[in-house]
Image: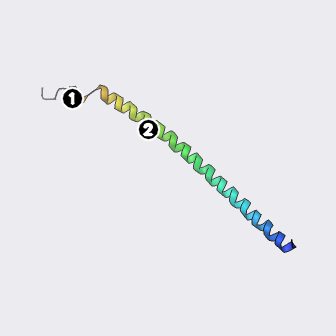
Amino acid sequence: MTEERLEQLEIKIAYQEDLLQDLNALVAGQQMKIDQLEASLKVLNEKLRELSSSTSTHMIADERPPHY
């Protein structure tokens, strides 16, 4: 290989390594955001279950209307 060709390959590899590091950081950030969203969703689901169980035990149909 010529010296110029070898230098061009080294430059390409350097750019690819830099891009790979950038993509790795992006994927890591996205995974952290996904983990946060999953935790939030879990909390919301638990609150929804609590609300649905509390309303099912206290049915509005069982209550007397206020005019009685």
The answer to whether 3 is drawn above or below residue 34 in the figure is below
| First in sequence: mark 1 vs mark 2 | 2
Residue 16 appears left or right of 67? right
The answer to whether 50 is drawn above or below residue 10 in the figure is above
Residue under the point 31% across and 30% down: 55
Q: Quadrant of residue 17?
A: bottom right
Residue under the point 21% across and 25% down: 62
Residue under the point 69% across and 57% down: 20
The amino acid type of the residue labelled 1 equals Ala
Q: Residue furthest front?
A: 1
**Residue 20 shows which numbered tag?**
none
Residue highlighted by disc 2: 44
Give the x, y percent position of residue 50.
39, 30
Give the x, y percent position of residue 10.
80, 66
Q: Which is more toward the observer, 17 or 36?
A: 17
Q: CA distance from mark 1 to mark 2?
A: 27 Å
Quadrant showing the N terminus: bottom right
Quadrant showing the C terminus: top left
Q: Quadrant of residue 9?
A: bottom right
Residue 4 appears left or right of 16? right
Residue highlighted by disc 1: 61
Residue 12 appears left or right of 49? right
Secondary structure under badge 2?
A: helix
Residue under the point 47% across and 36% down: 43
